Amino acid sequence: MTSLIRTTFVKVISPVQSGKIAGCTILQKRDIMGKALRDSLPPRPPKPAPFDYVSKDYTWFRSLFDRTTHRMDENSKVIVVEGPVASGKTSFAAALAEDLGMKHFPEANMDIHYIQQGVDLRIFDDKVPEDTRTFDHVNFNCCPTHRLAGNFQIMMYIARFGQYIDALAHLFNTGQGVVLERSPHSDFVFLEAMFSQNYISRGVKSVYYDLRNISLEDLLRPHLVIYLDVPVTKVQEAIISRGYKHEVEGKALTCEFIQEMERQYKNKYLRDISTHAELLVYDWTGGGEVEVVVEDIERLDFDQYVHREEPKMKDWRLPREVEWADQRMTFTNYKHSFMNQFNLPRTDVPELITSADDMFEYNQVVYSHPKLKYLTGFNVAGGDDGVLFKNKTPKYGEFF
């Protein structure tokens, strides 16, 4: 049965009282609303049609006529679902997004890097030097001390970072809220767990935090974080139960690794993020009901934090229309600028360096593929048309 864990930094609502409160409480203002509550209210005026932010820029001139706040409603929020491995985040996040009418972003993975223009770069692994081969979560679980493990975790942070920008762009341009599984803000729990088990070196950790420190401050933090708490022993049972061979037979997800992840979550991430976002922590040992969580969310007042110096919701206190427009322009038009921050000139960590000879051989093999010779949208052989008149690359393509 779902229950909220009582901590000093969590807004506590007893599930035993949930039905009673829901039955007698009159909502005086509109915060996040679930499907049942939305359906009980009179129809609302339609919002502006979603803006095609994938292929178009949101310009200053357009902002004069397309007001960002006109798209927003009480469900225009960023919600992040966190929890240990195999805790049921994916099914929960998908069900929560459906009930709240939000867009679900499945957890970022290495496909963001390795699938380019429909081509899976893993097909080249037997033809390129070892240091340039792909390395994903399957490889990591099988060999967590591999030379490429550190690079894998850095690329996972970049993948989460890029996905989070996509989520913000979606929210600003459509007004639809988003539900993500994990975020770049919490990614460090994996790095710390890897470091604690000597899977990666201190140099990799240093580079990771350099990249994190120069990039993370640019992102707007979430409105709400939901943590699904599952004991370590139950996590191990769930890993065996779902039966992914690379997890069950792999060497990475040891009891100590999972314990360190939990420690980093509870002692560091949850305490830090709760200074800005609302936080709900649930005992998810035996699973739970999404409807109960939705009722708890509906009772949260996201608009009560109005003072200028109040840390809660500080990133989202934008009193003027022009500030909403500026944020929308930033995340709609400049994803490439955000991603360029990761070109950090650190050459002091050998496992993060690929030799020029290996990289030359890699480029010769990979970019000889017909679909990869040209940038996305400029490959006539791949079916792209209008190449002669194109003057910019897609904003929301793969980053590798």
Image (cartoon, rainbow, N blue to C red):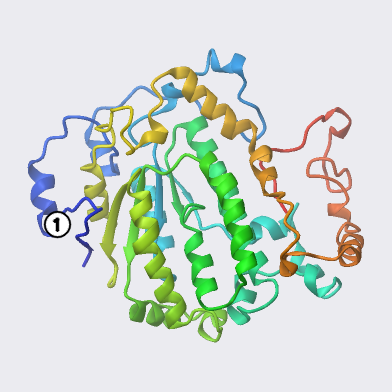
Please report the residue visible at 42 percent of the width from the left and 73 percent of the height from the top: 260
How many numbered discs sit on the rendered protein? 1
Q: Is residue 219 left or right of residue 27?
A: right
User: Which quarter of the picture shows residue 93?
Assistant: bottom left
Residue 266 percent location from the top left of the image? 34, 63
Percent across and percent down for residue 1 are: 21, 67
Name, please, the residue furthest toward the bottom: 249
- Helix, strand or loop at mark 1: loop
Q: Is residue 377 above or below residue 125?
A: above
Q: Which residue bears the numbered disc 1?
A: 14
- Quick one: label 1, few (<14), some, or many (20+) residues within 10 Å? some
Q: Nearer the viewer, residue 351 or 288?
A: 351
Seen from the viewer's position, the closer of residues 163 and 330 is 330
Q: Is residue 87 visible from the viewing direction of this image? A: no
Left or right: residue 26 compared with residue 131 = left
Question: Which quadrant of the structure image shows residue 215?
Answer: top right
Q: Is residue 327 left or right of residue 283?
A: right
Q: Where is residue 200 shown, x and y percent of the image? A: 61, 73
Question: Residue 156 in the image: x percent, y percent?
Answer: 60, 60
Point 10% across, 54% down: residue = 17
Q: Is residue 164 visible?
A: yes
Residue type, mark 1 in image: Ser
From this view, report whether residue 237 is shown above or below residue 210. Answer: below
Placement of the C terminus among the 4 image quadrants: bottom right
